[in-house]
Image: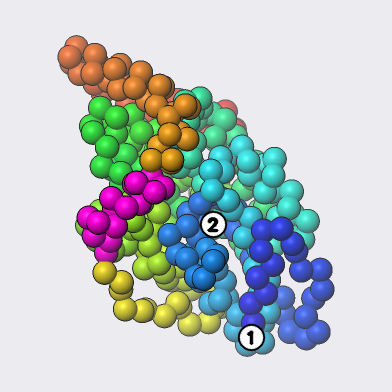
């Protein structure tokens, strides 16, 4: 049993001399890239952990991780999907959407269309799909309520779409949003936005459980390792000083002006007693986007 990790920029072109070959491709953003789970000079992440559990009974696993930090749903169809279909996989993880909510030009209809196109193409080529709903970034980052509420609204809309498309394309779905990220600080990396090594391992184990329940033959689940102590205040401050500030500045030119405008609109709505109106509008937009698919 072995796992052939082809990486994001190269694909294995030769089938092993003997045994079954299972191609597993991961598409998405920094969560699936593995940020927060560093091994040596590289990121590992939940998808690579899961890949190692797929090898059993002489089966070879060819794992390709196409995910990268900052990816939007639109990047799936334009960049990642063509690479994934170059050698059609039997198993494909598509976990994305968080970065869409962090953009001024957020459009739930476009997110819906792009995600549906990606899942549809992979399914049409015979892939078993893995999907997940994501936690709200505003809650993870502990943003003030006027800033966090618009992001939470957007994330709910994305997750509504993901749930519907999961049923539409018969995917295996993990409720990542429901895992205890805030209750167990050790599951989050120092940036408070990505899983720690322990958090990635939890995601891999949950996907392993779901695939096993669905009748897919797998090897043993990822081993449970001793949890590292959660990052302390000093580590949080050091990350903000060395990396976090650059992260905020990089997104401020795009996200912050729009987010401040949303926060102002949120404040006015609360004063007028109509704070639920924006929630209803976003929910309606997600429903209309899904209805447009037919």
Secondary structure category for the residue under label 2: helix
Q: Is residue 178 left or right of residue 204?
A: left
Find disc 1 in the rendering and name its residue. Answer: 1
Let me know if residue 46 appears in the view.
no
- Residue 162, horizontal then vertical, whole percent: 48, 44
Decide: few, some or many residues near mark 2? Use Cα within 10 Å; few <14, some 14-19, many ≥20.
Answer: many
Who comes first in sequence, dot 1 or dot 2?
A: 1
- Residue 34, horizontal then vertical, whole percent: 50, 60
Give the prevailing secondary structure in the magenta stretch: helix
Is residue 232 highlighted in magenta? yes
Q: Nearer the viewer, residue 43 or 73?
A: 43
Dots 1, 2 in contact, CB < 8 A: no
- Residue 40, horizontal then vertical, whole percent: 51, 71
Secondary structure category for the residue under label 1: loop
Real-space Cα separation, disc 1 to disc 2, in angstroms: 24 Å
The segment highlighted magenta reads 230-244
Find disc 2 in the rendering and name its residue. Answer: 33
| Residue at x 45%, y 78% (from the top left corner) | 221
| Residue at x 40%, y 37% (from the top left corner) | 248
The vertical placement of 186 against 84, above or below, is below
The vertical placement of 72 against 218, above or below, is above
- Residue 290, horizontal then vertical, whole percent: 52, 33
| Residue at x 17%, y 14% (from the top left corner) | 271
Q: Is residue 287 left or right of residue 89?
A: left
| Residue at x 36%, y 68% (from the top left corner) | 198
């Amino acid at each position: 049993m072995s796992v052939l990790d082809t990486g994001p920029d190269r694909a294995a072109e030769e089938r092993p001399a003997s045994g079954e070959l299972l191609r597993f491709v991961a598409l998405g953003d920094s969560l699936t890239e593995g940020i927060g789970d560093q091994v040596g000079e590289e990121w590992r992440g939940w998808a690579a952990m899961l890949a190692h559990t797929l090898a059993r009974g002489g089966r070879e696993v060819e794992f390709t991780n196409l995910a990268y930090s900052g990816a939007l749903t639109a990047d799936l169809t334009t960049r990642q999907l063509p690479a994934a279909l170059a050698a059609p996989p039997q198993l494909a993880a598509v976990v994305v959407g968080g970065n869409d909510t962090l953009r001024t030009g957020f459009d739930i209809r476009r997110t819906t269309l792009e995600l549906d196109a990606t899942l549809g193409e992979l399914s049409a080529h015979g892939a078993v799909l893995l999907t997940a709903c994501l936690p709200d970034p505003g809650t993870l980052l502990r943003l003030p309520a006027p800033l966090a509420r618009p992001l939470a609204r957007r994330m709910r809309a994305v997750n509504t779409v993901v749930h519907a498309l999961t049923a539409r394309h018969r995917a295996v779905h993990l409720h990542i949003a429901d895992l205890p990220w805030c209750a167990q600080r050790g599951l989050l990396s120092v940036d408070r936005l990505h899983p720690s090594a322990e958090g990635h391992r939890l995601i891999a184990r949950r996907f392993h459980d779901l695939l096993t329940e669905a009748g897919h033959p797998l090897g043993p689940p990822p081993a449970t390792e001793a949890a590292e102590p959660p990052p302390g205040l000093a580590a949080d401050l050091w990350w903000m000083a060395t990396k976090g500030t650059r992260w905020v500045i990089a997104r401020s030119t795009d996200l912050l002006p729009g987010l401040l405008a949303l926060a102002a609109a949120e404040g006015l709505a609360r004063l007028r007693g109509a704070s639920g109106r924006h929630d209803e509008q976003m929910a309606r937009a997600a429903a209309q986007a899904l209805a447009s698919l037919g």
